[in-house]
Image (cartoon, helix red, strand yellow):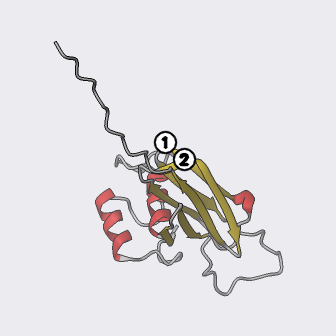
Amino acid sequence: MDAVMFGLETPLMAALQHLLDVPDGDAGAGDNKTGGGGGATRTYVRDARAMAATPADVKELPGSYAFVVDMPGLGTGDIRVQVEDERVLVVSGERRREEREDDAKYLRMERRMDKFMRKFVLPDNADVDKVAAVCRDGVLTVTVEKLPPPEPKKPKTIEVKVA
């Protein structure tokens, strides 16, 4: 796929392609898991492009964290929210091209039909057991509640014995 076609011709993507030495377009002929003669996998490059092209906002509220991610054109069945490695929030989805009509001829194809992905390292006070996600009008909001603050330690009184 051509990076220009999807509007991904940014300095960040150009630097990423240069570092990974992945030719623009097809990540290499042959097997689907490895790219050409390099060590980068097609999945890695695709995920890196998806993360660079998925806008997100992160807000800290008094009792929670809110992750707001644009997911245009995706339904709830197309979006995945996971917590990996106990501290990494992964939001992903994929929009596929709709079925082509036999009598229709595309004059321009600008809408992004690819993978959306973002990864966030959660703070230590995030409660990974209390995660909620709501998608409205193509905007996904993932809320992660905060753990209650630890109780302040009370001083321990030690009885002094008279010898």
Q: Quadrant of the C terminus?
A: top left
Q: Compared with residue 15, is residue 90 higher up or lower down, i.e. above or below?
A: above
Residue 126, image x, y percentages = 49, 51
Question: Please, which residue is most extreme toward the left here?
Answer: 163
Residue 16 in picture, x, y percent from top left = 34, 64
Q: Quadrant of the rendered structure where residue 132 is?
A: bottom right
Q: Is residue 10 above or below residue 150?
A: below
122 or 44, which lies in front? 122
Residue at left 30%, top 64%? 18
Report helix, strand or loop for mark 2: strand
Depth order, front residue of 157/56: 157
- Please identify the quarter of the rendering in which residue 67 is found: bottom right
Residue at image point 52% right, 67% down: 1
Q: Residue at coordinates 67% horizontally, 73% vertically from top-left?
A: 138
| Left or right: 28 as drawn, with respect to 81 | left
Q: Earlier in the sequence, mark 1 or mark 2?
A: 1
Q: Residue at label 2?
A: 128
Of 36 and 153, the residue lying toward us: 153
| Residue for badge 1 | 86
**Percent of width and height locating residue 149:** 45, 50
- Secondary structure found at label 1: loop
Rendered residue at 47%/49% (across/down): 88
Amino acid residing under circle 2: Val
Amino acid carrying label 1: it is Glu
Badge 1 vs badge 2, beta-carbon distance below 8 Å: yes
Query: Left of 101 or right of it: where is 129?
Result: left
Answer left or right for 50 relative to 138: left
